Structures are given as C-alpha cells and as structure tokens.
C-alpha cells in the first residue's frame, strides 16, 4: 500500500495463466491454494517460465525453469542482490522508472552493495542462477508476476521484503499492464474480505483511514453518531493483546473465529494471559482449545449454513448461499453481533446480509458501489465483481495500475530498500537447527474444521510430522515414521519424523495444525515492528530420538484422547440442543 497505493494483488488469479513468467517467492500453492496451483500449471503449459525461491524443494520446483534454494531468513539479502543483478545487467525499464517511480537514487544506494556473488554464501543461491532468474523475470513477454506468501510475511523483515518485491516489479516495468505485477496471495478464503471490510486497526471499510477527519465524519453521519465521536487513533493489533492484558490495558476479550491457543506463537504463555481477563468470549463453530477457556461461548453457523460475500485474494467479491438452516442454538455471526450491539445500547437492525452489504459496504465505499448482489448472483450464482467497481455498469477491475498509474498520494510508486538483518533467534550448539512452520494440504490452520472430518483425519492424524533431511536424521539417530522429541527455548513437543530429501540439512519443518504435536509451543512470540506479525518461520530448535516407541505411542494416544474428551465435555451443553 505504501509503495503502490493498494495492498492487494495487482492482477487477477485467472490472468496468471497468461503471464510470461511466474516467480513464486516463499509461496507454496500446491499445498496452500490448489486452485492457484492449477493456474501455475496452465501458465507453464502455455509457455510461461517458472522461477521458485524456497528453502524446500516444493512441488512447483519440479516444473520450474529455475529453482533457487534460498536459506530461510535471508529474503532481503536475496531480493537486494536480485534487484542489483537486474540493474547491473542493463535490464531495468528506465522509462518506467523515470515516469512512474520516485526515490530511485536513494534506493540504489542500498541495492548497489548487494550482488549475487557477495550474498551467495548467505542465501545459498548460486550467483549464475540468480542472474539467469533476473534475466527471465525482467524480459518475460508479455508480463511477469511476482507471487509471495508466508515465506515473506512471517519473517522479521517482512514489510521490507514486500516493499522490495513491489520495487522489483517497478524497476522492470513488469507492472501496470494486464496480468502483471505483484501477487501477495492472501491466505484464507476471506482474509482479503476481512481487510476490505475494515477488520484492521487503522482502516474503515474500503481502506478508508481512521486518521482522516473527513472519512470519520462520513462514517459518523452514516452510523448516526455525534460529530467527533469516532476515535482518531488506530486500534490495537491482534498479536499485541497478550501483552496488553499483562499491562492491565485489556480486561475483556471477544474472539470471533480464531483459535490463538493453537495458532499464536508461544501458546503456553498466551494461555496464562487469558486467565487474567475479567471476561473472555469466544464465538466459533466448534469447541476449540481457546473456546474451552471462554467464560461465554457463542455458537455460530458455518459456511454451509449461512450466506454472505467472500473477497478472494484477487479482490473478487463472490456471493455464496446457505445449503442448510442453522441447528440448535447456533446463530449467524451477523445476527449475534447485531443482537449484542442492540443490547449494549446501539441498535442494529438488518433483515438479511444484502441490507448489510448495501448499507455498510456499497454506500460507504465508492470503489464497491457497483458490486451489487444482482451482479454476484448472475450466471446462475457464478457471477462476481472485482473491486474497484465504482458504478452499476462497471464490469470490475482485474488489473490495477494500468499505464503505471499508481494510487499513492503522488501517483508514483515509492521505491524503498533497506539492509539485511539476521532473524531474531540464532542457532547455537544447544539449539542447532532452524524450525520453519508451514502448511500441509489435508488440514486447515487450527484443524477445528478438518480435524472434525473423519475422511481427512484418516489421511493424517496426530501428532503430525517433522520433516527432516536424511543427513540430520542420521546425525541424531532419528528414523522415518518414528515418534521423536523436538524442543526450543520455549518448550518441548512430541512429533513424528518424516525423513525427506526435499529438506536441506540444518532446517526442519512442522505444520501448525497439530494439537499434541503443537509447533506453537516451540515458536517465539517476537514480531516485526511495522505489521506486528510473529516470526513463525524462524526459531532455533534441537531434536531427539525417542528410544521407547511403545511408551511414546501410548503417551500420544492418552494425551490426544484426554484433549478430545475435554473439548467434548465443554461442548456438551450446546450439543444437547442439536440432538
Ligand atoms: N491445506 C491448507 N491450505 C491453507 C492453509 C492450511 O492451513 N492448510 N492455510 C491458509 C493460510 S491461513 C495461508 S496464510 C496460506 C499460506 O500459504 P503459503 O504462503 O504457501 O504458506 P507456507 O506454507 O506457510 O509458506 C510458504 C513457503 O515459504 C517457504 N519459506 C519459509 N521461509 C522462507 C524464506 O525465508 N524465504 C523464502 N523465499 N521462502 C521461505 C516455506 O518453505 C514454504 O514452502 O495458506 C492457506 N491455505
Ligand atoms: N507456527 C505457525 N503459526 C501460524 C502460522 C504459521 O505459518 N506457523 N500461520 C498463521 C496464519 S497465516 C494464520 S491466518 C493463522 C490462522 O489461525 P486461526 O485463525 O486461529 O485458525 P483457523 O483454523 O483459520 O481458525 C478459525 C476458527 O474459526 C472457526 N470458524 C470457521 N468458520 C467460522 C464462521 O463462519 N464463524 C465463526 N464464528 N467461526 C468460524 C473455526 O472453527 C476455527 O476455530 O495461523 C497463524 N499461525
Ligand atoms: Mo493466513
């Protein structure tokens, strides 16, 4: 948003097929987004070049023209060297830089220090491969798309790396034309929607800043509030909450659709903090580990039981309808919120989601005015609208910034660079391995949904896996499929070994889906300063073989059964209503 004026994908997902080059940087769509992965394969079939930079040999590496085995935690060193290679090889689009960007000279002062040669040892990437990747990316016709995911965002220098990805698109002119530019491929089906609708501490719906007095006045009027009553300061970020509880600044906490005791780092400390709250409310569709700690549990409906609008990662609004009615005490999220608000003295009355969409979104966000339910429901329900969609006749906007028109205050892209700094926690003799936590295809985030599905549980079960290189497995006496211990400065968990030659020595990988094999008992709650995102992709650990496998299997089964029983007991009162 700082660099280009919008913090979303500049292109559409379908258009990825028609790019000349796709560069996947810290993004593993085969596991995370199979529908995007299919576009990558189609692009390849249509002749696109594929570049992958990932510390693991991911599936897409197999069809890549160039695979760069970048070491975790070195993104900025790599991106600076990649940009340097582009400029030094004369591949820069000078006209685009002059007409559509600012601060090139300052940017170059930093970039000039980094070359593929002088960063090779640090990043683990062969300089010739980096130069070749730079040539492919910069010259690809008709366009290149730089895609990134959590391999960028969950590191200390995440915001800096995103700025560099945008800068690289700009200096090569691989942005501002169809099917080009940047693809921060947002994680969940509706995380883009949560941001679009203002579930951010500094924005109202439609990325309208809370610090802007005119915007505040508009929302005060629409919501029937006294002028000057909406706060002018941004609110807190979700990862700051445990600290704020400890400081006595937060006394009540209302969580809707999140399971931080599974998905936030250093989960044991988080759990202690929750005990200090005066009131803790959780609204979820399953009894989770977090919900089990709540004073009040509000059972909501799931995607099959309610209707609404999702925004896909490429800014596409999609309407979805309910398949079945709610059961028992379960109510729609919007209905619970409206009721709660009314009881707290601010009456909210809506008859359906379309009224909310029209009044709260279309009427207040000019860029979404043309995104009507009618448009989304067209084509037998397969219609959609991609923002910006400002008028009723507007077809939606697959590509942003066409002609190099950025939406920054000056209309030009802001080039920014910085020096590489190492990740916060370093390996040492006691904790010699880097733990990177990632995703697996069969289970979803906190696993409340997929873990309660028998078929998926049959594919993969507790305690999940730790992927380890054959070299390290041998060094520590760890055998494939055996239970093993892994520990960090925060804790120790039991997991199952997956000896995997796609992993480089020195690093191990776990997915954050498992309740017994919970990697977030190991991770560190250290966040970057700008976005306050935890460094989930980097901490120091040690591994240990377990001699008595029979004991370990028993321990696993007992722990898992006890946990499941506890959640079942907690859920019993609500469940009664359904039966
Ligand atoms: N099946 C399934 N799908 C999911 C999810 C799920 O839980 N299960 N979760 C959803 C969510 S919430 C999200 S956010 C998305 C995330 O989707 P992705 O962004 O694909 O997420 P990850 O697998 O965490 O990380 C991507 C890659 O980053 C690499 N990586 C780690 N460190 C570095 C580094 O320093 N540099 C580089 N270049 N790469 C690095 C990892 O090896 C990994 O392959 O997936 C979504 N899709
Ligand atoms: N170590 C490590 N930790 C990570 C990550 C990592 O890579 N490594 N990734 C991080 C990322 S990118 C993300 S996005 C988070 C995800 O972390 P969470 O948001 O905690 O995980 P989800 O499984 O998406 O949780 C969503 C919750 O919403 C509930 N739910 C589903 N549908 C509805 C609904 O319609 N209404 C309501 N009220 N509830 C609903 C589900 O039952 C579930 O309990 O995890 C983060 N944690
Ligand atoms: Mo995510």
Image: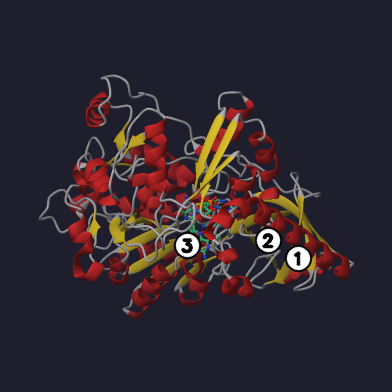
Task: Name the residue at the bottom extreme.
Answer: 45
Give the percent coordinates (x, y) of residue 495.
Answer: 74, 62
Residue picked out by circle 3: 130
Front of the two marks 3 and 1: 1
Task: Name the residue at the left extreme.
Answer: 393
- Say left or right for 333 vs 518: left
Instruction: Tell me which label, 2 or 1, sits earlier in the chain.
Output: 1
Instruction: Quote the CA–CA distance across marks 3 and 1.
Output: 27 Å
Label at residue 472? 1
Q: Quadrant of residue 413?
A: top left
Query: What residue lies at 58% left-to-right and 75% top-to-bottom?
Result: 455
Query: What residue lies at 24% left-to-right and 52% top-to-bottom?
Result: 387
* Applied colour scheme: secondary structure
Give the percent coordinates (x, y) of residue 285.
Answer: 51, 54
Residue 219 in sight from this viewpoint: yes
Instruction: Tell me which label, 3 or 2, sits earlier in the chain.
Output: 3
Q: Secondary structure at mark 1?
A: helix
- Say left or right for 99 vs 263: left
Give the percent coordinates (x, y) of residue 149.
Answer: 46, 56
How packed mark 2 is, by other alpha carbons closer than 10 Å (few <14, some 14-19, many 20 or more), is many
Label at residue 508? 2
Q: Quadrant of residue 136?
A: bottom left
How packed mark 1 is, by other alpha carbons closer than 10 Å (few <14, some 14-19, many 20 or more), is some
Is the CB–ligand 1 distance for label 3 below 8 Å? no
- Say left or right for 384 vs 7: left
Q: Secondary structure at mark 3?
A: helix
Is the CB–ligand 1 distance for label 2 below 8 Å? no
Instruction: Tell me which label, 3 or 1, sits earlier in the chain.
Output: 3
CB under 8 Å between callouts 2 and 1? yes
Relative vertical location of residue 9 with respect to residue 348 in this rendering, above or below: below
Q: Secondary structure at mark 2?
A: strand
Instruction: Quote the CA–CA distance across marks 3 and 2.
Output: 25 Å
């Amino acid at each position: 948003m700082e660099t280009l004026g919008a913090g979303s994908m500049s292109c559409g997902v379908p258009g990825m097929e028609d790019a000349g080059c796709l560069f996947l940087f810290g993004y593993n769509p085969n596991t995370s987004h199979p529908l995007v992965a299919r576009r990558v394969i189609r692009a390849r079939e249509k002749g696109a070049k594929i570049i992958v930079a990932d510390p693991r040999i991911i599936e897409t590496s197999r069809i890549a023209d160039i695979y760069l085995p970048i070491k975790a935690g070195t993104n900025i060193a790599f991106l600076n060297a990649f940009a340097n290679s582009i400029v030094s090889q004369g591949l820069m689009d000078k006209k685009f830089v002059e007409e559509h960007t600012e601060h090139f000279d300052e940017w170059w002062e930093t970039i000039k220090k980094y070359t593929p040669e002088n960063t090779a040892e640090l990043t683990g990437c062969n300089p010739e491969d980096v130069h070749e990747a730079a040539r492919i990316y910069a010259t690809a016709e008709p366009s290149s798309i730089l895609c990134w995911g959590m391999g960028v965002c969950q590191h200390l220098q995440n915001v800096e790396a995103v700025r560099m990805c945008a800068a690289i698109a700009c200096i090569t002119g691989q942005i501002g034309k169809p099917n080009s530019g940047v693809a921060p491929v947002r994680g969940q089906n509706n995380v883009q929607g949560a941001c679009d609708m203002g579930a951010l501490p500094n924005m109202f719906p439609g990325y309208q800043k809370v610090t802007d007095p005119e915007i505040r006045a508009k929302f005060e009027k629409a919501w029937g509030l006294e002028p000057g009553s909406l706060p002018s300061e941004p609110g807190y970020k979700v990862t700051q909450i445990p600290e704020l509880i400890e400081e006595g600044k937060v006394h009540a906490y209302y969580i809707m659709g999140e399971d931080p005791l599974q998905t936030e780092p250093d989960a044991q400390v988080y759990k202690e903090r929750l005990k200090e709250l005066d009131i803790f409310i959780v609204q979820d569709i399953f009894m989770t580990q977090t919900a089990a700690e709540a004073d009040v549990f509000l059972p909501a409906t799931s995607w099959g039981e309610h209707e609404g609008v999702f925004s896909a990662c490429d800014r596409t609004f999609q309407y979805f309808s309910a398949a079945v009615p709610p059961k028992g005490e379960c109510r729609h999220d919007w209905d619970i919120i409206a009721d709660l608000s009314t009881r707290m003295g601010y009456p909210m009355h809506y008859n359906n989601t379309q009224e909310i969409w029209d009044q709260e979104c279309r009427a207040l966000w000019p860029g979404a005015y043309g995104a009507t339910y009618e448009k989304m429901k067209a084509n037998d329900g397969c219609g959609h609208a991609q923002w910006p969609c400002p008028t009723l006749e507007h077809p939606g906007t697959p590509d942003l910034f066409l002609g190099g028109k950025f939406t920054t205050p000056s209309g030009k892209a802001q080039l920014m660079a910085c020096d590489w700094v190492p990740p916060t926690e370093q390996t040492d003799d006691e904790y010699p391995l880097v733990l990177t936590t990632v995703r697996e295809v069969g289970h979803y985030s906190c696993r409340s949904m997929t873990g309660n599905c028998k078929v998926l549980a049959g594919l993969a079960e507790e305690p999940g896996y730790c992927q380890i290189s054959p070299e390290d497995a041998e060094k520590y006496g760890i055998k494939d499929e055996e239970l093993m211990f892994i520990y960090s400065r925060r804790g120790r968990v039991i997991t199952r070994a997956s000896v995997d030659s796609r992993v480089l020595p020195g690093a191990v990988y776990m997915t954050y889906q498992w309740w017994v094999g919970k990697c977030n008992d190991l991770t560190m709650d250290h966040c970057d300063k700008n976005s306050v995102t935890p460094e989930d992709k980097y901490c120091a650990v040690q591994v240990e073989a377990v001699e008595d496998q029979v004991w370990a299997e028993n321990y696993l089964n007992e722990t898992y059964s006890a946990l499941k029983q506890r959640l079942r007991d907690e859920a019993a009162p609500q469940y009664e209503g359904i039966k």
